[in-house]
Image (tube, rainbow, N blue to C red):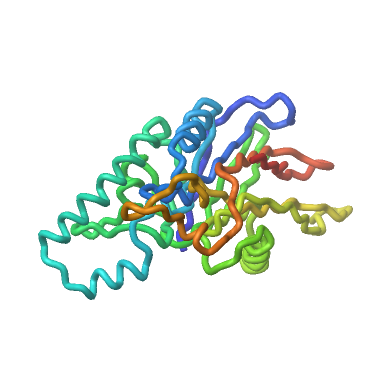
Amino acid sequence: MEIISFAPSKTLSRNFPWDYTFKLIPIGDLHVGSDGFNLEALDHTIRKGVADGCWFIGMGDFLDFMSSGNRQRQMEAGLYDTARTIIDDAADQLVEKVKAVLKPSIGRWLGLLEGNHYWVFDDGVTSDQALCQYVKAPFLGTCASIQVRFGNDHRKSITCEIWAHHGYGGGTTPGAILTKLMKAMAAFEADIYLMGHQHQLTTHKPDRLYTTHAPNPRIMAKQRLLVGTGSFMAGYKQGSHYAGRPQGSYVERRALQPSAIGAPLITARPSSTAGFPRLELSVTS
């Protein structure tokens, strides 16, 4: 588990007593290489996010190249070096396709998680790590806790804790991913919990009560934000083909629910209630 401490650039917000606002867009489950990958939607999201001063975090599965099972079987096959080189070249072409879309966002990433779909090149660098190097962001591995710090000249400070995981297992409903995030909330202390993998674009905002440490204690509510981070792969696409014949994606073959295309926009704004600093969290999709 990686832990990253991050101080965001400051933008003016006239709606809150503190002059900092932080906007985050989780980007994941692109599945570049699949017939359903929506290049136009990703390009629009990246360009609009950059124009609006947003930051990004990669949620994994940028490529639709090989799953963990595929990689294991490929290693066991004992391919010739030439065959391996050809596969490397094919994976590199997909990475270059992603780079072209992410180019405007270089330097605006908190980091990229590793999903279950990626390729390991001959030099040991994975496709996820190659993208991290390109966008100048840390590689977050399997799971990460990211601390986004806010402060002002009056020595007030607050930290927004972000817990992020690519995701795991099955489940086809919004409730399935929210259940996993609720379990994560019971194990990890954070303000924002992010998970992808299931392609669900869904949110839940449970409050947690706590007692302040002051001469006159009072009960306060602290917001929590649980977010299923969506996808840029359409499960159903008219006219999809494989090997020269009509055939749908694994989503269509298993008659799974179609998922919304896109990513959520998360906003964290420092505020205060009765003199106690707090975060105002919101999300739109």
Q: Quadrant of the C terminus?
A: top right
Q: Where is residue 121 drawn, in percent x and y?
A: 23, 57
For residue 193, side relative to residue 75 (left or right): right
From this viewpoint, which residue is outermost toward the bottom?
Answer: 76
Name the residue: 59% across, 27% down: 11
The reply to whether residue 25 is in sight is yes
Name the residue: 31% across, 55% down: 243
Q: Where is residue 130 drawn, in percent x and y?
A: 30, 48
Q: Nearer the viewer, residue 161 or 55?
A: 55
Q: Where is residue 152 drawn, in percent x and y?
A: 63, 34
Q: Nearer the viewer, residue 18 or 68?
A: 68
The reply to whether residue 111 is in sight is no
Look at the picture and state if 157 lies above or below 145.
above
Q: Nearer the viewer, residue 218 or 83?
A: 83
Q: Quadrant of residue 119?
A: bottom left
From this viewpoint, which residue is outermost toward the front?
Answer: 245
Look at the picture and state if 180 lies above or below 3.
below
Q: How many marks?
A: 0
Q: Where is residue 14 drawn, in percent x and y?
A: 71, 24
Name the residue: 56% across, 44% down: 261
Name the residue: 30% across, 67% down: 71
